[in-house]
Amino acid sequence: MDRRVSIAARVARGLEALAIGLGLTWRAMLRPKVTVQYPVEKKNVSHRFHGLLGLPIDPETGKDRCIICFQCERVCPSRCIHIEATGKGKERVLTRFDIEMDKCQYCGFCVEVCPTEAIVFAPHYEASTYNRANLLYTLDDLHKLAPKEPIATGIVRTNGRKHR
């Protein structure tokens, strides 16, 4: 008799679990759909989006904001940033700033460490390609990717407080 009660109790628990699962399924089926028809429609990205990187040009001077301190190159854990410069002191000119996006981990260390906000996240997320060589972004490519307004910088300020 005791065995029949335990079997009946297990069957009852199983039917209850089945009813709960089917209820969740029906509720999800009846909710409005949130599917985006991707190539036609595109979702806006969050202000904290970690996507492709860009090098904005300073609108006041028309030159790079990069002061060639090499901090982003040093802090990068995947060693995907390569910088070269010519000249000395204030006469130094940026000649190469490459990012190998196929190696990039999108960690954001380079954005956080930059003292002049010369490297920023861009709102672009379409970086797929059939050719790996297309994932090497040169200085000109990074200037083109740079948004007019940065999506995220190293420190985001809200309500007068700093957030990382």
Image: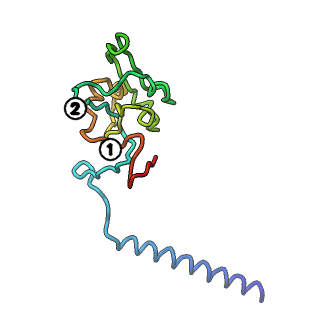
Foreground of the two, 30 or 48 = 48
In the image, residue 35 above or below residue 56: below
Residue at image location 33% in from the left, 42% down from the top: 125
N-terminal of the pair, mark 2 or mark 1, is 2
Residue 28: horizontal and vertical position, in percent?
A: 40, 70
Q: Secondary structure at mark 1?
A: loop
| Closer-to-camera residue (141/102) | 141
| Residue sitting at the far bottom | 1
**Label 1: how many Cα within 10 Å (few below 14, some 14–19, many 20+):** many
Residue 109 image offset from top left, x and y in percent: 46, 35
Q: Please state if 154 lies on the left or on the right of 54 as rendered.
A: right
Q: Is residue 70 shown above or below 8? A: above
Residue on which the image places disc 1: 151
Residue extending farthest top: 87
Q: Which residue is mark 2?
A: 59
Find residue 133 and name its label: none
In this picture, is 87 found above or below 123? above
Q: Give the residue drawn at x 63%, y 81%.
A: 11
Q: Secondary structure at mark 2?
A: loop
Query: Quarter-wise, where is residue 149 in the image?
Result: top left
Residue 151 percent coordinates (x, y): 32, 44
**Tag count in the figure?**
2
Q: Amino acid at mark 2?
A: Pro
In the rendered view of the protein, which quadrant contains the N terminus?
A: bottom right
> Dot 2: few (<14), some (14–19), or many (≥20) neighbours within 10 Å?
few
The CA span between labels 2 and 1 is 17 Å
| Residue 68 x/y as whole percent | 38, 21
For image coordinates 44% across by 48% down, the residue present is 162
Say if mark 2 contacts mark 1, CB within 8 Å: no
